[in-house]
Image (tube, coloured by chain):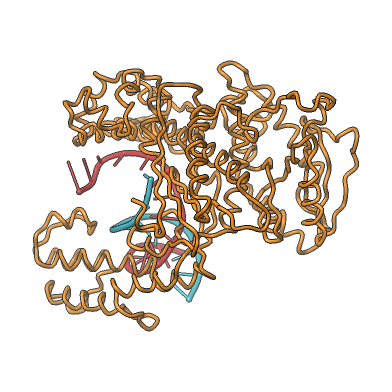
Chain colours: A orange, B cyan, C red
Amino acid sequence: MCTKRPPRALCRKSPGGKHPRETRQNWNMYLLLAAHPSGAVLQELTKAGHPHPDNPEPRLIAEGELADIVLGLERRPRAGQPPRWIWHRTQDWYPTLLARGVELERCYDLGLCGNILALSQFTAHTDYARNAEKVTLDDPEQDALFDDLATGSRPSFTLEDLRIEYAAQQEALAAVSPEENRRNRLQLLLAAESAGAMIAAEMQHAGVPWREDLHAEILADYLGPRPPLGHRPAKLEALNVELRGLLKAPALNPDSPQELIRALHRNGIEVKSTRQWELKESNHPAIGPLLAYKKLSRLHTANGWAWLDAWVAGGRFRPEYVVGGVVSGRWASRGGGALQIPRQIRGAVHADPGYKLIVADASQLEPRVLVALAQDSVMAEAARDQDLYAGIAAKGFGGDRAKAKVALLGAMYGATSGEAGRLMPQLTRTYPRAVGFVEQAARAGEAGAAVTTRLGRSSPPPSERWFQSQRPASAEEQRRAESIARSRGRFTRNFVVQGSAADWAACWLAELRRRLRTLRTEGTARAELVFFLHDEVMVHAPVHQVDACITAIEDAAGAAKELLFGRIPVEFPVSVAVVDSYNNAK
DNA sequence: TCTGATCGCGCG
DNA sequence: AAAGCGCGCGATCAGA
């Protein structure tokens, strides 16, 4: 399952033996692309970020010529290697190129990589990180960069600005200690993050196959026919009428938490909030219809007909993915709630004729990452099987899987109370290394220190509130300071696990993308990555390529494990489902 | 009437 | 079942 060969797209380039006459200097082609009033400007650089001595002059490109020129350079690889495109933000260039049919092999995203290098503890001793401290990462002026193009004025970042930035980033990377493979790990993270930016654009371009007719059927089943604008669907309205009767509140709007809680109190239902779980404690006859109303109301407002109108077109849902949108390295999304597609409507995600959806997820990824990070050999042994929680339950929890799961999740999230809190001593007794690892991350966070993922992404500095709470002048302020510190401890405790899992997932995605690209043949149906959700991928594949895709997914997972941790006795199994409809995937 | 905060709930 | 982490989003609500 695991590839022994180092992955080409992600590893440091070595001279290799196939082209002995090539010098290392020009083994790779680094092409910097910057905005320019007349379109774009392109320059070939050395790896270190200097103008390439053989071809130092920048080249002006009119806007209409860009796609053809980029494609020409991409298809004229040097020594078998396509160029690495260097640009400020992948989002500014790649979607347009994709729209013109241009797909690229690899890039270097200066914005994303700069964010990582500015915070990473691996580069904390460099000028790059020190200078970055003074710069706000979310500089609003940067957003104006490409607005300038419309007005024909000078872009905020010239080719030379970006060249200097790239050179500075390479210098910072080169200054990372090679100990414990840190430099290679950070370089891998930068490559994977840049690949992620390309994948995000490609997935948005491809879209999730979405059957509007099936979606409409689901809505009609749950809610009744589509109502006129501003009206409740029939089934919601019926529940509303029933609720008003049961709660003796003839004008009740159940969407208003305030009105609702007053009505509940008047009927002797003493709840502090109107959350589902709290309502479920009561057995008043109104609770059933109320929970039903809430469920349907959620479907209607979040993924109803309005959502369908706004986000699905031409049989595809095209959300915007925000790579680096979460400090831990997870992706965020903008528009359409792409990362929250509810189970209720997954039946609308449906393969095209002649295609299948391959849905794969990394089983129990975060606890497995914790085992690997902490090098807890006892837990690794317990977690050898497909079901990690059952294995852990067998040793230390008398086979009680539910208890083992609650305890382990509690350890990763920092639970202090409830069942999870009570189980912590039990977990610690059997698995001291794993628990100790997250405890150490928590202590560091409480004290204001940064913590770092496997590949070198570090947590941001403490909040302003944390700093202000550091000199408490009263017992009250002291308690407050401790609460703020514990809160940050829970964040850093989780950061190392969630973030390292995101490292793994980024490598998995990049490795998978590379393998899928080798399946491509000109002009035929092709397998495409169409969705990614933290530890899950979806590939839309022609039937005849399904087996090859499954192999690619599994091999990519094995490769990701080795890239992060080397050869360790911890498995990262993926579960794969081949389906027509997403709701049959789990 | 607009804006930002809060509630509640969907996903991992 | 919720509690301990990370998100996005729509409706309501408070305040200008």
In depth, the one of A576 and A463 nearer the eye is A576
Res A110 visible = no
Say which residue appears at 63% left-offset and 50% top-offset.
A520
Query: Is residue A184 shown above or below A339?
Result: above
In depth, the one of A25 and A559 nearer the eye is A559
Query: Is residue A516 shown above or below B1?
Result: above
Say which residue appears at 50% left-offset and 67% top-offset.
A311
Res A12 visible = yes
Figure quadrant of residue A54? top right
The residue positioned farthest toward the top in the image shown: A179
Direction from residue A164 to residue A233 in the image, left or right: left
Q: x, y percentage for residue A112?
A: 62, 41
Q: x, y percentage for residue A197?
A: 60, 46
Direction from residue A185 to residue A401 in the image, left or right: left
Query: Is residue A428 shown above or below A143?
Result: above
In depth, the one of A520 and A90 nearer the eye is A520
Figure quadrant of residue A31? top right
Direction from residue A45 to residue A508 in the image, left or right: left
Q: x, y percentage for residue A368?
A: 38, 30
The residue positioned farthest toward the bottom in the image shown: A228
Say which residue appears at 66% left-offset and 56% top-offset.
A95
The residue positioned farthest toward the front in the image shown: A544
Say which residue appears at 22% left-offset and 28% top-offset.
A393
> Across the whole image, how many numbered discs are drawn on residues?
0
Q: x, y percentage for residue A392?
A: 26, 27
